[in-house]
Image (cartoon, rainbow, N blue to C red):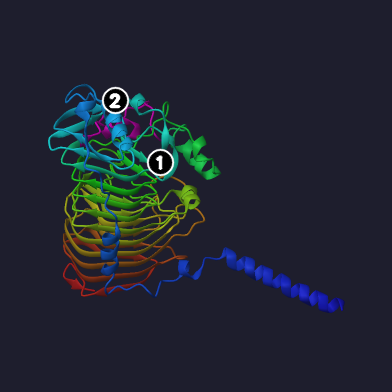
Amino acid sequence: MKDILKLVLGLLLGLVIISCKNQNEPVASDTETSAEVNFDDPWKQADEIVKNIKVPEFRDEVFNIMDYGATADGSKSSDEAFKKAIEACANAGGGKVLVPAGVYLTGPIHLKSNVNLHLEEGAEVKFSTDQKDYLPVVHTSYEGMEFMNYSPLIYAYKQKNIAVTGKGTFNGQADNDNWWPWSGKDVYGYKDGDVKQHDAHNLPRLSDMVEKGTPVEERVFGEGHQFRPTFFEPFECENVLIQGVTFVNAPFWVMHPIKSNNVRVKDVSVISHGPNNDGCNPEYSKNVHITGCLFDTGDDCIAIKSGRDNDGRRVGITSENIVVENCTMKDGHGGVVMGSEISGGVRNVYIRNNTMNSPNLDRAIRIKTNTRRGGTIENIFVKDLEVGQVKEAVLKINTRYAIYANQEGEFMPVIRNILLENVEVENGGEYGVLIIGREESPVKNVKLKNVTIKNVEVPLKIEHAEDIQFVNTTINGKEY
């Protein structure tokens, strides 16, 4: 009887061990290439995403900021006028807050549900250069880490049905005397001995809080710290429209929809060459349509994010269902980029009918991560891309990205299912295709179809990648 009991207990213990082991192992979908991905026609899904994004609608009532005490010659702040007009509009059930032609000084603008902030042609909104005007601190984010910091210049928190539209200009007034020196780079006005974002009381302290899991509300920075705010940040918002306006002179990232759903960015111009002046960074966001825009930036034109390290894993929201089309990319570190704050993962990105061309554009399509970030990046489709000139690579996938020290960890990234179709490149720069995978987790299932790359120094450099396919593809005149 004792022998039977021992046998039964042994079997039960074995089952428990197997069960625990299986729970700790990645599921098959995290380690194997999906057999269901259709490289022949993924664009029907892109059409569905665009079709299903709800465009905000607003009441016809107009709230002119001039009626609330605004000054249109830039001689004094119109901060209170913006606040009162937005408040009145929201209280009335929504409508259009109108900014007529003229120059307006203001502090941060906080949007509310059902409000369309509309800039007439000839309107320029200039934001205060006094950092104290961006207090008290609000719930925001810096490079994929949530915290309490200076308010974004235009901010919406947990709002629905909001818009920024028109043909006017938002001027962040960031320059080598305001915001930019905190980057710590001489070219942006930093001088030896000045405080900067990489000092111990800034990024290292915030990174330590993220590592320890400190609650966001306890990560209080703002005054006395050197974190630059984003320009326009809809945070946990639903149904967002950004259309027609121009952004210049941004302190940091320009458009940063974070944890938001149903976002359309249409016919927007970003002309801003400061540090970290990314054009549009959807983060933890779903159902995003970026179309007809011009990006001429100091960093990535478009960079899709999903949190840095433990914060990305804590939040656990994948950025997905993102369509980028009919855009022009000029200067920038990359045309369309995924990463490096990518710990929550990215999937279902559709990039079509875009033009990229500048001697100051480093890469066309880029994916960057490492084993601290981790993340699964999958189902990235590129079609009808025209590239005049890039510096480094047409396609760059790097799982050893490291701009900061200590970027090796225990979170192996997974990258799979990448398609480039109908791509024409006149001057490909240093590399045609540059892929740096990991032996433990190779980049999988990359297909180039109808791709022509001219004038490139190194056609291919590929490390640790599987299932790389070339169909009707030529690089420097050689077919692959």
User: Which of the two residues, 114 or 24, is positioned nearer the viewer here?
Assistant: 114
Measuring from the top left, give residue 210's x and y in whole percent. Answer: 50, 43
Of marks 1 and 2, which one's residue comes earlier in the chain? 2
Q: Is residue 298 visible?
A: no
Q: Is residue 55 left or right of residue 20?
A: left
Name the amino acid, label 2.
Glu
Measuring from the top left, give residue 171's x and y in whole percent. Answer: 22, 34
Name the amino acid, label 1.
Ser
Residue in view at x 32 percent, y 73 percent: 38
Q: Nearer the viewer, mark 1 or mark 2?
A: 2
Measuring from the top left, give residue 225's x and y in whole percent. Answer: 42, 29
- Give the vertical position of 218 relative to 350 (above or below): above
Reading the image, the residue beneath label 2 is: 80
Residue in view at x 20 percent, y 59 percent: 428
Check the picture and name the quadrant holding the C terminus.
bottom left
Reading the image, the residue beneath label 1 is: 141
Main SS class of the magenta portion in the image: loop
- The picture quadrant where one finds residue 462 is bottom left
Measuring from the top left, give residue 362's x and y in whole percent. Answer: 24, 51
Range of magenta residues: 170-198
